[in-house]
Structure formats: C-alpha cells, structure tokens
Image (cartoon, rainbow, N blue to C red):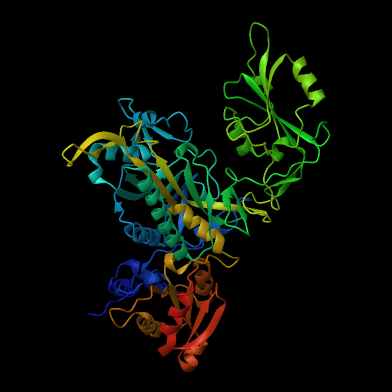
Amino acid sequence: MAVQPVYELLRKSFLRNKNPVNRLSSLNLQSFRALHVDGRNRLSTFWVPTGGIAPQTAEDDGSHSSLIRGGFLRQAYSGVFHLLPLGLRVQEKLERLIDKHMRSIGASKLSLSSITSEELWRQSGRFGANSELLRLRDRKESGFLLSPTHEEEITALASGIVKSYKDLPLRVYQISRKYRDERRPRQGLLRAKEFLMKDLYTFDYTINMALETYQTVRNAYAAFFDELKIPYLVANADSGTMGGNLSHEYHFVSQRGEDHVCSCAKCNYVANEELAEKAAHTPSKLMDTLEGVRMWTGISKDRNTLVHVYVPQVKVETRDETIDESAIGHINIHALKSVYPDLDTSIEKNPLHLLKTNSSNGTFQIVRIFDYRVSPNLEETHRRDVANRGEINDITTHPTTGKPLDLTRIRTGDPCPICENGTLTVQRAVEVGHTFHLGARYSEPMNATVALPTQNASGSMALSGQVAMQMGCHGIGVSRLIGAIASLLSDNRGLNWPRVVSPFECVIIPSRGTEEDAVGVYDTLQGVSRTDVDIDAILDDRPIKDLGWKLHDADLIGYPVILILGRAWKKDRRVEVQCRRLHVKEDVKIDKLREVVMSILEKL
C-alpha cells in the first residue's frame, strides 16, 4: 500500500464525517505540515522551525542570530540553549569526527557524572581558586558541584582501579555537558553557562612517556582541525589553574574572539598574549622624568602592599578603541603577574581605600616595578612615596630569570623574540581546543600512584615502590566550535557549514510540478556499490512554501550544496547546482550530477 501524506488522510476523514467539523474540509489542507515517511531525508518530516526571532546586540556578529533563525537552537535562559534537530545533527557529526581521531590514538570512550563533590576539589586544591563553580546542596547539606571539568573525578577513578605500571598507558575520553557560573554569558554558544566539551585524559608512569603521549595527542588534534578545512593557529599557552607547565591552545582567528594571539610570519612563533614575549632593544637613555611615563597603581592580594608600575607611554589599541588616558591600557598584565604573582588583578582602579596600614606607625609596603626603559631614579616619585611613609622595594629585573622587564603590551609590529628580522602580528581569536601536560599536578595530592618494576638480585623483575602517574588533559569545546564555525563562515545571506559537520551536505529544491522528479534526483546522489560514499542529501518537499522562500531558507541554513529543479530541468533535464562558498552556479546533466556534487564537496 502506497504511503499517503497525512493531509490527504485528514481530508478524506473530514469528508466522511457528517459532523459540523466538515466545514474544515473547505480549508486548503495542502497548507498543513505533512509527514511523508519513506526512508529518504525529507524536510516535511524534519522539524526545522526557521525564521525565529533573534534580537541582535552590539556583541552579536549576526551568526548567533542566524543559528536561531535557521532553526539550529533556541535560548532557554541566559547562557543556556536548547539544540533543535539541525543543531543536533551538527553536534553529532562533530562528535563522530572526534570519535574517529580519538580512536586513532587508542583512547576509550566513557561517560563521567556531571555531578562532583566539593571534597574532591578541596583535595586537589582547586575549590577556593575557582569562583565560577556551580554549587549544589542536597537534603543532607552535602556539597556538590556541576562539573566545569573532570580532572578530579577521573583521577579518583583511575587511582581506585589502576595499581600497576602494567595497566599503563591509559587514554580515556568523554564528550559531556559542563557547567560554569558565568558572570555575563555572551555571544551565544561562545560564552555560555552550559556547554559541551570533549575531555581526553591520559595516564603514564614516566615523564618521557607522558611527553610522547602529549605529542601523539597534538598530532591527532592537528588531523582533527585539518578535516574542518578552516585555518587555525596553535599557540603556546599558560596552563593557569589547570596546572602543569606545558600547554597549547587551538584558535580560530576571529574579530569576535576574546583571546589575543601573537604570531610571527617569518618563523613558527605563536603564543597566547598571556605567554607571548617580544624582543627587547637596549634604549639609548633611560626615562628619568615623569614626562612620557605612565604609572599604574595596584594592590596585593593580602591588601598590605601598594604596587606602582612604571611603563613608557605608547599608543595602545584595545578592541575598537584607542586608549591613551588609562595607564592599564599600556601594561601587559600577564607579564606583570609573572613578575609579582601576589598582585590582585581583579582590582584595576582606586585600590587605595583597600590598603591596610600598620596599626602601630601607620606605614605600609610599596613595591615599585619598572619597565626596562624607565629609570628607577624618578626623584619626584621617590619623594612622594617616602612622604607617604611607605617602605619601598624596587623591582627592575625578573625575579626568576634576571632579565630586564618589558611590561608594555605587545602590539602588531613589535620585534619577534625568536627570529632576527621577524615582527609580531596580534590577532583576536576564539579558543576552541587546549592540550595540557599536567604531570603529577592531580595524581600527587589525590594519591594516584602505580607500582614500578625493579630488578632483584636474581635478575628477575618484581614490583616495588610507588610513583605518581603522569597525566595529561586535552579538551575540545564542541558547542563552542559550533558557534565559532558559524561566526567564521556566515555571510549576509546566512550560515555556511563545512562538509564534515554540515547538517546535510546538499538540499534538493523542486519547483512546482517537479516534486516526483526530485525523488529521482535524490536517489541518483546515493552510491551504487558498497564502496561508494552516499551523499547526505535532503529533499525540501514542504508543500506550504514556494520556491523563492525555500531558496532563501537554504541559504540561511547553510547547506554546502543546493540543487534546484527549475527552468533548466523543465527545459532539458539539467539540475542547477549552487555552492555559495566556492561561487559555483552551473546547470548539470543528471548523469553527471553525482560526480559534480562529490567534486564540490571534496573541496569543502
């Protein structure tokens, strides 16, 4: 029995019924949504609520609005989003791509609970340092957290199971929802309270093995990002609260990014602004007057010390504004933190009212930090600090390396610290991945150890001694990738997905009277032999929309390839093939269609 569209069954039912509801039969039931199920992908059976209202703000570049209007997601609350069927298909394709590259390095997939305990985070030492934790209390007042990351949980799990070096190396990963008490969610999926991430955790029993694993993971990440066919940067990065002393970030260059990445075109130097350096040139004369010098005042975390920072005044651009008035606009706050780790960077203005003075004599500590171009013999400044009864300590070189201090922000055109003639370019970027070599940062405090082999007097091997496992953690922001890709590849007509993550690779749009022919075109795109790769196509067979509306909708959704059965089809059986990213628009005979579409998709 042939499958009949639902609207036809409804119409016949209404006609048979003599109830007053019969008057509904006078309606045009062709305008009702239809469900036509026959094994083919059809928009009539796929929920795509396009055209949703998305208020655009100054922070929005239009791509987030396109995700909403294109039927990919809806906002539930501030920083929380529901994925609709189109968005879920993009997410699932990203997950399959991640699975592929995790399998390539022998990683096993698991699923950890999204709930973790305060006790574990206190054990690792991260509970007090992380102010963005979403906290929970049960009826027993037990402290729980919605995990923003799972280092503590996976370390506790591994320490209870892995006891011998023979159980290593171990590589496990998950793709799960994470949570962050984001103070100001913004830019849609790029900065949300709930987000999807891939976490890979690695365990080895020697540092050298862990470093080899780290490089293996980096190779897998490169292969993953290469498949997206979107330019990306890999930057040396600061490990921050995650721990360890080796990490790399993966960035898409974007004006919507919140990170600044510094790179040199003449060598391979790429670093996040937090870790970046620039070459220093010996000045002909130190600046010994306040003219041309900017001073910024900060305060220590314990509120007992004022911190005066002196840098040369330069023209500094931050975001889209030029700031010459504010001293903080001239200072590389990351370099300053390296010199004086006790600085409270959350206080940028007017810290004097927070200062604690000695109750007996009213004195306080003053630390003065000088850029290498500024002389510490600023007489006027010295007299003022002494008059304030401050106990002064000057810092002119890095306390660890002994190098002169360059405390100014890195700007495009600054000299490269690696090569002789290179200059740095500073670009805004969106971080979409991060790899960390953690060492024993978590395994030591959480007692995750394994027994090592030793050779006894008889020459046989035995287990003796315990060593903390060497760990690595490696993340990819799945939901953030969706937002970043949408932002990078969208234009004024809509989204533009890469083939590997597009919800569908192509859409077939029939004009009136060619609906049955469109089914044959759909079947033509599918592979003939087992080795042929099917094209992930969908039919736009929605009866309630005309051709013009469907074409506009296809652009908004961002299918890589659009196939139209229009005038050329009615005239001589040619399908109009469009690809916005490659600027393709041509009429193709049906017998060549699959070949042409595949050649286009291979470039996307």
Which of the 4 quarters of the picture holds residue 121?
top left
Is residue 227 visible in the rendered structure shown here?
Answer: yes
Where's the N terminus, which quadrant? bottom left
Q: In x, y percent, where is residue 437? A: 42, 44
Is 369 placed above or below 524 here?
above
Q: In x, y percent, where is residue 91? A: 40, 58
Is 114 placed above or below 588 here?
above
Q: In x, y percent, where is residue 32? A: 40, 69
Residue at image coords 45%, 51%: 477
Residue at image coords 37%, 43%: 207
Residue sitting nearer the eye, 228 or 2:
228
Is 205 left, or right, of 457 in this rendering?
right
Residue sitting nearer the eye, 262 or 575:
262
Q: In x, y percent, where is residue 499? A: 45, 69
Is 439 placed above or below 82 here?
above
Is residue 66 visible in the rendered structure shown here?
Answer: no
Is 219 left, or right, of 556 in this rendering?
left
Which of the 4 quarters of the picture holds residue 339?
top right
How many numbered circles are shown? 0
Is 278 left, or right, of 557 in this rendering?
right
